[in-house]
Structure formats: C-alpha cells, structure tokens
Image: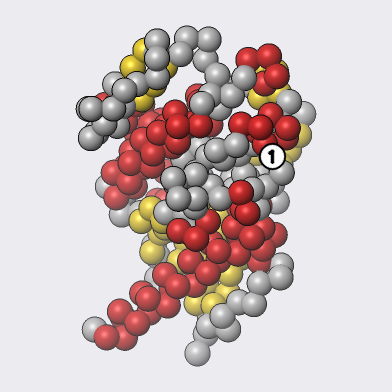
Amino acid sequence: MSKRNILVLGDSHTHAIKTALAGYKTNPDYSIKVYWILKDKGNAIRGDLAYEEALVKISELGENDILALSYLGTVHNVMGLVKNPVPYDVMMPGDEGAAPLAGAEIIPYRTLIRFFSEYALSNKKFLALRKQARCRVLHMSPPPPKKSEKFILAHLKKYRGHKLSEVGVTPAPIRKRLWDVEYRALETVLRDMSVELVPPPPETLSATGFLSEDYYEQDATHANMKYGSCVLQQLESIATSSCRKRQAV
C-alpha cells in the first residue's frame, strides 16, 4: 500500500513545522513534506521552494492526498502589532455590554470582517494554489498573538520602519481581537472555496486564547518547533480520521 502524501506549503509560519519535522517520528502511513515558498523581503530572499515549483508539486498530488496551506491570516500583525497614534478598539459580537478602551475610537466589526475577507480574496497566488489542487485542501491557522509585550519589545526592535521602543506595542487584548476577527473572516472565505480552516492546536493556547509562552519563537509573531510538532500531530490526526471515514463508507 502506497503512502498517503501530506504536502505543507506556505509562508514563514511553515518554518516551525519544517524544523519540527526533522526530528518527528512520522506515522509510516504518511509522507509529509514541508516547504516555505520563496519570498523576496527587501534585501533578503526567504524560503526554499519557488512558487512555480509549488504549483507543480500540488499538481502531482493524488485525490487521496492532502494539501495543507499556511498562506493567509497574518494581516492582523501588519495592521495591529505597532501601537497606533490614535487609540482604537474592536468590539466583537456579544461584547455590547463591555467597556471599550478609554478614549479609543471603535472600529466596526463588519468593517474589519469585510477588510480581512477582501484582502484574502485579493491574494492571487493563494487562489492559484487552491485551484491547482484536486485533493483535500486544508489551511493551517497562524498562531494567535503573544500576550507578553515585554517579550515582543525584547525580541523585535523595528517593525515596518517603526522603532517599537518609541511607538510601543498595541495592547494585547486588541491584538487578540484583531486575530479573532481575521480568523472568522477566513473561515467564511475558505469555506466558500471548499478549504477547511484548521485552528491552532488547543494545547498550545493559554487560558485566554493567546499563544502559550512554551510555544514562543524568539521573535514577535512566530511559534516555535514545539508548536510545529503539535501541528504535525494535527495533520496526521486529520488524515487518519478522513481515512477511517472513507473505509466506513
């Protein structure tokens, strides 16, 4: 019996998964490959697989294989990591009785949902990756924010031209709400594409839904190899579950 392929493709969040894979005892029924699609970031080119090669690898997958993408869901960091000079807050559905941040402007929930949805739908490279697949397609959620502002300030001096020591970090509750809204937007967008959004492994989360400190990478936004190992376990569990469902039919 041939092995079932699980192909993981995406951005920098695949690094934790690939690093974990090097020492991971893979289920013998599966062949897992992880690639970071090449991206030019200023003076540095990051990644290990050209986009065109990624399309080829997807085309080689069989109907019973799994494509796991990690490509969307990071806009909350771009817009919300650095503290804005104009204080703002986000009120989630069900928060009607909650008090917003003092003196903050309220960003309407629907406005944010629309923004995150339109941003995801405008990603032509992601759309092409999805279109190339004839197998089951998953999208791995990026990890939620790190609550510790002290940790972020210690591990990131500049972000998109801003010195964090001067401008500061957006309060953790707001960063978490931005992540929540983007996650909800992705759920709908991806469902309409027949792509399943896979949440962060529950064991990696704190009681309040932030990334647990045990899973911090030594930077402001990424999770570590231990987190990557949990994602690999998730993928194998999903693959095993779907295999059992097919056998039961």
Name the amino acid type tagged 1. Asp
**Furthest-right residue in this view:** 43
Q: Which residue is mark 1?
A: 219
Q: Quadrant of the C terminus?
A: bottom left
At horizontal 27% and vertical 47% (from top left) the residue drawn is 192
Q: Secondary structure at mark 1?
A: loop
Q: Name the spot of residue 231 as percent of width and height, x first.
A: 53, 61
At horizontal 23% and vertical 35% (from top left) the residue drawn is 94
Left or right: residue 197 versus residue 1 is left
Asked whether residue 128 appears in the rendered view, the answer is no
Asked whether residue 83 appears in the rendered view, the answer is yes
At horizontal 33% and vertical 38% (from top left) the residue drawn is 185
At horizontal 53% and vertical 83% (from top left) the residue drawn is 29
Please say which color scheme the image uses: secondary structure
Q: Is residue 188 above or below residue 170?
A: below
**Furthest-bottom residue in this view:** 1
Left or right: residue 162 versus residue 59 is right
Q: Is residue 200 above or below residue 185?
A: below
Q: Is residue 146 above or below residue 109?
A: below
| 117 or 209: nearer the viewer | 209
Q: Name the spot of residue 218 as percent of width and height, x first.
A: 71, 44
Q: Name the spot of residue 137 as percent of width and height, x first.
A: 40, 59
Question: Looking at the rendering, which quadrant does residue 16 occupy?
Answer: bottom right
How would you rate the neighbour count of disc 1 (Cα within 10 Å): few for under 14, some for 14-19, many for 20 or more? some
| 113 or 84: nearer the viewer | 84
Left or right: residue 97 versus residue 161 is left
Q: Name the spot of residue 40 as percent of width and height, x first.
A: 68, 34
Q: How many marks?
A: 1
